[in-house]
């Protein structure tokens, strides 16, 4: 079931209908009309004052990038140290 073209801030009532054959329509007797309301249209200026949106994630993403850069630098440093130790041990064997 799809409900399309609804307007924000309105109330709608839906009647459920069961169609068993293309030429026969039977109203479902056990259900009552369902009423629902759509949310009011969001004010774009209100979104900016809430502190949400893309700007909210920016400091967290910068922190993650810094931590990832430090982890990569540490990994490369350890790798260089291990490779130098391996080269020294190979030279001492010959």
Image: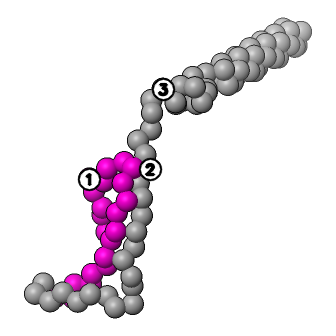
Spatial CA distance of label 2 from label 1 is 14 Å
| Front in this rendered view, residue 90 or 52 | 52
Question: Relative to residue 61, is residue 83 depicted above or below?
Answer: above
Q: Which residues are magenta?
A: 1-21
Looking at the image, tell me whether mark 3 or mark 1 is earlier in sequence order. 1
Q: Residue at x 40, y 68 (%)?
A: 35
Q: Position of residue 77 (x, y in %)?
A: 79, 13
Spatial CA distance of label 3 from label 2 is 17 Å
Mark 2: secondary structure: loop
Looking at the image, what colour scheme do you see?
Answer: one colour
**Residue that mark 2 sits on:** 39
Is residue 6 located in the magenta-colored stretch of the structure?
yes
Mark 1: secondary structure: loop
Q: Residue at x 52, y 30 (%)?
A: 46
- The residue sitting at the left extreme is 23
**Residue that mark 3 sits on:** 45
Question: Relative to residue 29, is residue 57 depicted above or below?
Answer: above
Tell me, for residue 31, which label it has, or none.
Answer: none
Assign the N terminus to one quadrant of the image.
Answer: bottom left
Spatial CA distance of label 3 from label 1 is 24 Å
Tell me, for residue 5, which label it has, or none.
Answer: 1
């Amino acid at each position: 079931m799809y409900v399309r073209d609804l307007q924000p801030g309105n109330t709608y009532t839906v009647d459920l209908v069961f169609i068993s054959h293309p030429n026969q329509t039977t109203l479902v007797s056990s259900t009552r009309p369902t009423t629902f309301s759509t949310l009011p249209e969001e004010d774009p200026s209100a979104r900016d004052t809430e502190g949400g949106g893309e700007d909210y994630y920016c400091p967290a993403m910068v922190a993650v990038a810094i931590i990832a850069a430090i982890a990569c630098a540490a990994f490369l440093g350890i790798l260089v140290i291990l490779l130098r130790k391996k080269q020294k041990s190979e030279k001492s064997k010959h």
